Image: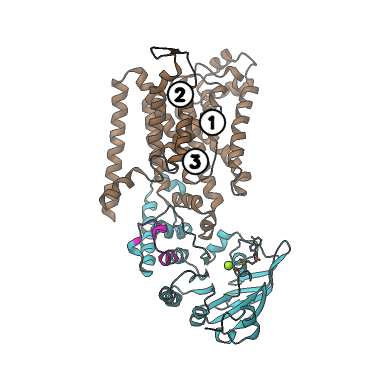
Amino acid sequence: MILELKGVTKKFGGVTAINNTTFTVNSKEIYGLIGPNGAGKTTMFNIITGNYQATDGEVVFRSEKLNGLKPHTIVRKGIARTFQNIRLFKTMSVMDNVLIGFDFQANYTYFESIFRFPRFFGEEKRIRKRAIEILDYFGIAEFAEHKATDLSYGQQRKVEIARALATNPAMLLLDEPAAGMNPAETKELAHLIRTAREDFDLTVLLIEHDMKFVNQLCDKVLVLDYGKTIFEGKPSDAIKDKEVVAAYLGDFAHD
Amino acid sequence: MNIVIRKDQWINLAIIASALWFIWFASTHFDEYTVRILNNIAIFTILAVSYNLINGVTGQFSLEPNGFVAIGAYVTALLLLDADAKDYQFDIESPYPWVLGLQANFVWALFFAGTFSSLLALTLSFPVFRVRGDYLAIVTLGFGFIIRILAINNPEITNGSLGLNDIPEFSNLYWTGGIAILAVWGILNIVNSKYGRAMKAVRDDEDAAIAMGVNTFKIKTFAFCTSAFLEGVGGGLLAALLTSISPDLFTFFFTFQLLIIIVLGGLGSTTGAVIGTVLVIGGAEWMRFLDEPMNFGLFVTPAMPGMRMVVFSLILIFVMLFAREGIMGKRELKDLFKKGKK
Ligand SMILES: Nc1ncnc2c1ncn2[C@@H]1O[C@H](COP(=O)(O)OP(=O)(O)O)[C@@H](O)[C@H]1O
Ligand SMILES: [Mg+2]
């Protein structure tokens, strides 16, 4: 068990975005968070990453309570994320986008960078080499010096995941990674996530609408509906569950 | 990869060597008037590249320069003037004993000016950057006003509205130009490091930067304090160039001029800030005729002091409306050459 949510509730004024949700994610699992729009999935991510504070309940990661920690601290503990709508640094190159992921891992001080101490060169060389390795892994090394936002949508998704992996996470949070992708790109992405789990020793928590994608990829799913948990278990069983089908108003019927 | 870095370093060394040669050549061959303009350009280069660090690179809209430049100028002046000179010129109130005791050589005076400015910046950082920095512009604007009011109303320290005079004229082109080279080099080194990348990331998307583990409070504070340090040093150089300073020198107008420079050069580009400085400070000299009476043959216009500023304001408005990116955009000079090679 790597991540545990215990009775997490999040209220925005009168709206209860998440209502007393409890679940655990095991090491190296690919865990899906599904549910209709507005179900509270992204909010759940934001609570885990520290962007929002839970109104009630606890988030425990590797036996450590995360409540109250700053988002940049939580990243350093090993939880990285991507965003529902791609958020790359738009004036920066693909390489620099990925290098931001190494920000807290490059060991040189502000002073050493101003006066170009040897440690600056050594550390920059080290993180650049690793950044190229990650870009290579995603097959986008040739675009390293391109402006990130000049790439195709599918490639930008890859840059975003590469950037998250650069933080050297134990757990990766993907918010609708397949959104806006064509079937071929979706298939490639599923493959990539599965192999990345092995190669980077990852646990993956992902939000997705595409049930085919979830079915192929996830070991386990949690279905949310208006902040309430209505199902937890194997994805293949989720499709058969009456409540789940009702929540989706037959969205799964054709799958 | 290694070879590329080598080549870059050679080019940098060549640029620095030519700049140093130019400083020597200008000091020994040019007339006093031209050297004076070059001194101004050097000092404003220091101010523009540091202002651009917080405003352009980090994307935190700030109006701080006049406040920190004033601090730097006063600290330096008080450290350079000896006790007799202070005692002699303080006409409104007699100076506090500790004011008389302040004394340091030029290098230490500039260092203290920068340090004092950046310590003040640090104290401002805590309340401002804790809440995203949305209030930075207002806080720094107010800060500039407060510094000026304090300078006017504490004649025991600052000699009030009379200002400080007979400051030893230590600034020359070697000092101003040398420190300008160091400032541009240091700022470019910051920009091309993990700190500079994080600053740009904060500008582009602060939430995404946080999600990558960047401590954005720290990054904004670093940028702000670095700007303040160099603005303090620039203020010190200015005081030792002009030999007299008064609160009226450091109005919001001073900041506005720098804003024009960095917007014209391209917000976020350090080399753009240098180019903007040369154009605006050089151009301001060239356009001096605008402020004077003009004879159009058929009619003669009276002297219109401030006419140049009207022209600059129009240029600023034009750039904001039609050429948002300024001259350089966010690129540096070397990026232009890279494009050609591809
Ligand atoms: N910052 C916020 N302030 C107010 N309401 C919010 C905020 N974030 C999310 N919500 C609300 O919480 C609910 C769940 O949103 P979200 O987690 O984005 O859903 P999902 O990702 O499952 O589509 C929605 O009703 C949304 O309007
Ligand atoms: Mg969402």
Q: How far apart are labels 3 and 2 at the CA level?
A: 31 Å
* Colour representing chain B: brown
Among numbered discs 1 and 3, the one appearing first in the sequence: 1
Residue B119 sits in which quadrant?
Answer: top right
Q: Amino acid at mark 2?
A: Arg
Q: In terms of secondary structure, what is the magenta stretch mainly?
A: helix
For the point 55% across and 34% down, the residue is B116
Same-chain check, marks 3 and 2: yes
Side of B293 where B14 appears, left or right: left
Image location of residue B195, percent across then percent down: 46, 50
Q: Amino acid at mark 1?
A: Asn
Image location of residue B108, percent across then percent down: 48, 30
Residues shaded magenta: A143-158
Viewer-nearest residue: B32 or A189? A189
Identify the residue under disc 3.
B226
Image location of residue A137, percent across then percent down: 37, 70
Identify the residue under disc 1.
B66
* Colour representing chain A: cyan
Q: Secondary structure at mark 3?
A: helix
Question: How many C-alpha atoms fall within 10 Å of the one at disc 3: few (<14), some, or many (≥20)?
Answer: many
